[in-house]
Amino acid sequence: MRVLVVTAVPAERDAVARAVAGTPRVRAVPGAELHRAGPFDVVAGGAGPAAAAAATAFALASAPAPPTADEPYGLVVSAGIGGGFAPAAPVGSLVVADGIVAADLGAETPDGFVPVTALGFGRDRFVPPAPLVREVAEATGAVPGQVLTVSTVTGSAARTAALLAAHPGAVAEAMEGFGVAEAAGRLGVPVLELRAVSNAVGPRDRDAWRIGEALAALTGAFGKLVPVVEGWTHDRLDRHRAPHRD
């Protein structure tokens, strides 16, 4: 099964591609380069949910059509580094999303934040296939939980507390997962999010970030992911796909 992996930046893309021996094959897709490494086609789509959604949609639409030798993508993975909520996801650990949540999509009111679903339209989360999440967690040691998509990286204790109060199951935050899921969902392709924790969510302290350590953990995780995705088929994913939750 072929897997499309969408990262934000080239350093994350290259960390994923290094999980598979050999030099990746590169081909152009609109606005980006797609690097093929084993079962993974990896694209650096840009930071934030809008760029991630656009890159995912273009990559899926640009996939070779039958009767070429390529099979269609069976899974899309949002991957990269992110912030972890202590103590569930310390720096250097891995997280896998059992829910991909748009944490700041909605409206501010005098009574606080209201998610877009409470406004009566849209969606604010996607649910990856639960058995796949379990297998990825077992294979990589990743902590399962909600991964929050935010457009502004959290930089204060007050915002951290507010996010955890609204999403007590959250283990990490990043900026692309919901955008990737939105594009994949519209084409009926299941989605997963896998992150390596580079920093703690909270007051911003760049000196405490461990980006190199997180990128190395990401490479290790995708090396362990190869046999997992090879054990899944399109039919198996379809049987276990969960509907989105508004």
Image (cartoon, grey):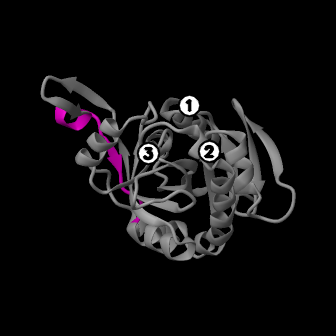
Q: Residues within 10 Å of mark 1 (few under 14, many from 20)?
A: some
Q: Locate residue 2 relative to residue 184 in the image: left or right.
A: right
Instruction: Please give the residue where the numbered disc 1 appears in the rendered image.
Output: 51
Q: Which tag, 2 or 1, sits closer to the chain's start?
A: 2
Amino acid type of the residue tagged 2 in the rendering:
Thr
The reply to whether dot 2 and dot 1 touch (C-beta < 8 Å) is no
Instruction: Specify start and end residues of the magenta stretch as a single range.
Output: 116-129
Q: Nearer the viewer, residue 152 or 116?
A: 152
Picture coordinates of residue 217, whole percent (x, y): 64, 61
Residue 201 tag number: 3
Q: Which tag, 3 or 2, sits closer to the chain's start?
A: 2
At numbered mark 3, what does the secondary structure look like: helix, strand or loop? Answer: loop
Residue 7 tag number: 2
At horizontal 66% and vertical 56% (from top left) the residue drawn is 213
Q: Which tag, 3 or 1, sits closer to the chain's start?
A: 1
Q: Judge depth for marks 3 and 2 and give the one in front.
A: 3
Q: Nearer the viewer, residue 175 or 215?
A: 215
Amino acid type of the residue tagged 3 in the rendering:
Val
